[in-house]
Image (cartoon, coloured by chain):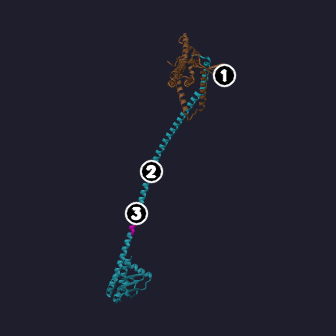
Chain colours: A brown, B cyan
Amino acid sequence: MTGPELVLGAAGLLGQPTLHFGSFAISESAVSATALTVALASAAAWTKSRLRMRDPAGWQLVLELAEQAMDTTVRESIPKAPERILPLVGTLWIYILLANLVGLIPGLHSPTGDLSVTGALAMIVFFAVPFYGVRAAGWAAYVREYFSPMFWMFPFHLMSELTRTLTLAVRLFGNMTGMEVAIGILLLLAGLLVPVAFLFLHLIEALLQAYIFGMLALVYIAGGMQALEEKEQPKGGTVR
Amino acid sequence: MSFDWTTFLLQVINFLVLIWILHRLLFRPVLRLIADRKAATAKAWEEAQRVRKEGEELQNAYENRMTLWEEEKEKARAKLLEEMQGERRRLQAENDRLIQDERERARAVEAHRLAALSQEAESRALRIASQFASRFLQDLATPDLEAKLVDRAIEELERLPPEKLVEMRGSVAREGVGQIEVQTAFSLEEGRRERLAKALQKACGRELPCKFQVDPLLGAGVRAEVGGWMARANLKDELLFFASKGEA
């Protein structure tokens, strides 16, 4: 049995290294993304076991503040059943932030620097929009929305959905990859200490991109739900 | 830039699993904890408000009770003051009465003492005067003085009022008096003796025999005894009468 072997992809700096476990090959980003998932799940389990009602620790207060901030943001955007949206959007924010920060660890690449990973996240958002939309207003109303105001608008609606999903994936991938490439080039050209400033920039970029991705997902989901609700309200005769 | 379907599918699965895990282990427990804490805080706040309200009610009740107590205290104090004033007035009146009684008693005692002193002084003066008079009259006690006194006695007997005479005669009759005893300091002359005997017999209303005796202790004058009746007109009896007036 042979050990894992690191092979650079054909695209050089732009590509993700691939790990080979014998005949089975898997990208490093998949491994790090899975490791991140396991780490987050373990941390969540550890956190749950140590949550205290009285005299909470400092980290618990920070966690509660962060979750309350996320919950408030979701509630401000989603007026109807916001608690259903929080797990998806909150997980996006936490996961993407930590995935972006993985790139700061020497020798590791951010999973979000892989289009396959960001594409998967964007695809989940793509399906989440109709999922929550159908749950909010039903199948018929949601599908009818794609044919309004004219039936021939359907392709445009579909194209809009696909392009915004694509932009979600490419925006995150492009920003994180660009940042890593820039830091790598600076590391090759200027030595060890010069990229430190860029590492701070990476930190901000990681935070910003996680926030943008999560907020866009929230806006897309909220937009789908609210568009349906706005159509329903005149039928009820309660809104002029 | 490459796209790997394996990574893509693995990531989808990873992320969906992660959503489920975080929902179960992080978001829901933390939100529930926050909600529970808010509820506990709200409950504690309500409890605190209730306790505060109870405290305010207790404070109001206490203040009302204190006000009532103050009023009762003032009433009790006023009543006590009034009672003390009444008791003071009563004691003052009692004291005044006692003082007045004491003054009256002292005044009576003093008056009594003064009266006793005065009487003593008077008695003493009379006694001295009696002694002086008896000593002085010893030199004047002569048969002439006695004759004058006898004459005076005869005149007195003759001028006795009728009711006195009736009383005297009734007494002589009841007692069965047999004779009249007459004492003089000097021996009387016969004529004066007879006049005296007649005056006495007239006063008695009977012819009783008269027994004349000489008693020098009389000083001068006469003493006549008819049963329980006695007629005195001599220095000794006069001085004794004078002295007895002082001792009375």
Q: Residues within 10 Å of mark 2 (few under 14, many from 20)?
A: few
Give the number of the mark in front: 1 or 2: 1
Q: Which residues are magenta?
A: B98-109
Q: Are marks 1 and 2 in contact (CB under 8 Å)?
A: no
Quadrant assignment for the C terminus of chain B: bottom left
Q: Magenta part mainly helix, strand or loop?
A: helix
Quadrant for residue A100, please give it: top right
Question: Is residue A131 visible to the viewer in this orientation of the structure?
Answer: no
Q: Quadrant of the N terminus of chain B?
A: top right
Residue A171 to residue B118: above or below: above
Residue designated by label 1: A2
Residue A221 at x, y = what percent? 55, 19
Q: Tag 3's secondary structure?
A: helix
Chain identity of mark 1: A
**Residue B139 shows up from this direction:** yes
The Cα–Cα distance between marks 1 and 3, rounded to whole angstroms, is: 136 Å
Front residue of B118 and A22: A22
Q: Residues within 10 Å of mark 3 (few under 14, many from 20)?
A: few
Residue furthest to the right: A1
Between B191 and A158, the residue placed more toward the observer is: A158
Counting from the top left corner in percent of width and height, residue B245 is at 37, 77
Residue B109 in picture, x, y percent from top left:
39, 69
Residue named by callout 2: B77
Q: Secondary structure at mark 2?
A: helix
Q: Which mark is residue B99?
A: 3
The verdict on residue B102 being magenta is yes
Q: Is residue A240 above or below residue B59?
A: above
B179 or A29: which is nearer to us?
A29
Q: Amino acid at mark 2?
A: Arg
SS at circle 1: loop
